[in-house]
Image (cartoon, grey):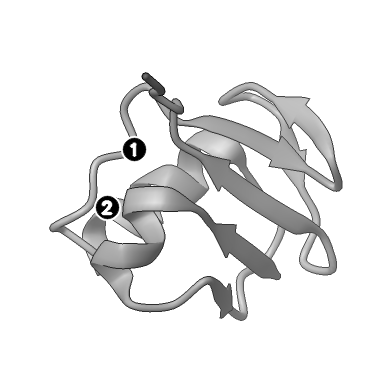
Amino acid sequence: MEILLFAHLQETIGQSQLTIDMPQCTVGELKQWMASNYPNISLQQVMVAVNEEFAIDTTVIQPQDTVAFIPPISGG
């Protein structure tokens, strides 16, 4: 599974992309996995896309999918 990270998530983890070996799961389960493996990140208010389509916590992710965590963008 490919995980794409943007903005502060990328800065906090130090990578823009992760490749993990995970069986089929939901977006919510992946968020829990991320929180336990990277406890210094916050996924609250982060939008999630699976294969370039926005997803919710109950969306099922397959091992070959690409998941993007997209934090809210602030501008000025």
The residue at which mark 1 appears reads as: 43
Residue visible at 62% across and 80% down in the picture: 21
| Along the line of sight, the residue nearer the viewer: 9 or 63 | 9
| Along the line of sight, the residue nearer the viewer: 7 or 49 | 7
N-terminal-most mark, 1 or 2: 2
Amino acid type of disc 1? Leu
Of badges 1 and 2, nearer the viewer stands: 1
Provide residue 61's location: percent of width, then percent of height: 74, 48
Placement of 67 over or under 45, stated as above or below: below
Residue visible at 13% across and 57% down in the picture: 40
Residue visible at 58% across and 38% down in the picture: 27
- Residue contact at pointers 1 and 2, CB within 8 angstroms: yes
Q: Residues within 10 Å of mark 1 (few under 14, many from 20)?
A: some
Label 1, label 2: how many angstroms apart (C-alpha)? 8 Å
Residue 65 shown left or right of residue 6 in the figure: right
Placement of 73 over or under 64, stated as above or below: above
Provide residue 54's location: percent of width, then percent of height: 75, 26
Placement of 68 over or under 65, stated as above or below: above
Q: Quadrant of the C terminus?
A: top left
Amino acid type of disc 2? Ala
Provide residue 52's location: percent of width, then percent of height: 84, 42
Provide residue 6's location: percent of width, then percent of height: 50, 53
The residue at which mark 2 appears reads as: 35
| Along the line of sight, the residue nearer the viewer: 57 or 40 | 40
